[in-house]
C-alpha cells in the first residue's frame, strides 16, 4: 500500500465533521437544516456542529468533489446537497472497513490494542 498517497487522499476529508456530513449525504440529498439536525442528533461526544462550520465544510467538500449543491426553485428558495457518486462509493468502502475493524479489533485490554501492553 502506498501509505503516503493514501494520507494525501484522506487529508481532504479529515476535518472533524467531514465524515459525518458525507455519511449523511450518502443516504440521499438533504437541506442544510435537516443535515445539521441529523448530525447533531447523532453526535454523542457533546460537540455540536454549528451553521458556520457546516457551511465551511460543505464548501470545502464541494470544492474537493465530494458534494454537489443545487438550488431548488421554490418559494422560498431551497438549497439541497448530495454526495457525489465518488463520495457514495468512498462511504461504502469506509463502511466495509468499519465492519472489518469491529469484527477484528483487539480487545481494549488485550495485547495489540494501542493502550494495551
Image: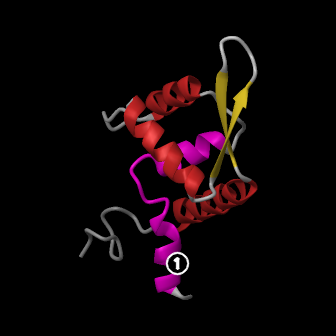
Q: Nearer the viewer, residue 48 or 32?
A: 32
Q: Nearer the viewer, residue 31 or 47?
A: 31
Query: Which residue occupies 66% across, 22% down?
Result: 78
Count of number-bearing discs: 1
Query: Which residue occupies 42% across, 35% down?
Result: 43
Callout 1 environment at 10 Å: few (<14), some (14 to 19), or many (20+)?
Answer: few
Q: Residue furthest top?
A: 75
Q: Secondary structure at mark 1?
A: helix
Q: Is residue 99 visible?
A: yes
Residue 86 percent location from the top left of the image: 71, 60
Q: Look at the magenta stretch and give its main secondary structure.
A: helix
Q: Residue furthest bottom?
A: 2
Residue 61 percent location from the top left of the image: 55, 52
Above or below, 91 against 4 in this view is above
Q: Which residue is mark 1?
A: 6
Whether 97 is among the magenta residues is no
Query: Which residue occupies 33% across, 75% down?
Result: 111
Whether 24 is among the magenta residues is yes
Q: Which residues are magenta?
A: 3-25
Amino acid at each position: 500500500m502506498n501509505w503516503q498517497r493514501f494520507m494525501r487522499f484522506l487529508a481532504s476529508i479529515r476535518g472533524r465533521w467531514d465524515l459525518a456530513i458525507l455519511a449523511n449525504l450518502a443516504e440521499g440529498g438533504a437541506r442544510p437544516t435537516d443535515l445539521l439536525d441529523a448530525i447533531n442528533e447523532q453526535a454523542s461526544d457533546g460537540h455540536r456542529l454549528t451553521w458556520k462550520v457546516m457551511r465551511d465544510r460543505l464548501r470545502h467538500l464541494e470544492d474537493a468533489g465530494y458534494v454537489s449543491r443545487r438550488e431548488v426553485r421554490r418559494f422560498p428558495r431551497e438549497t439541497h446537497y448530495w454526495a457525489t457518486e465518488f463520495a457514495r462509493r468512498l462511504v461504502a468502502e469506509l463502511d466495509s472497513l468499519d465492519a472489518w475493524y469491529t469484527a477484528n479489533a483487539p480487545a481494549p485490554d488485550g495485547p495489540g490494542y494501542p493502550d494495551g501492553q
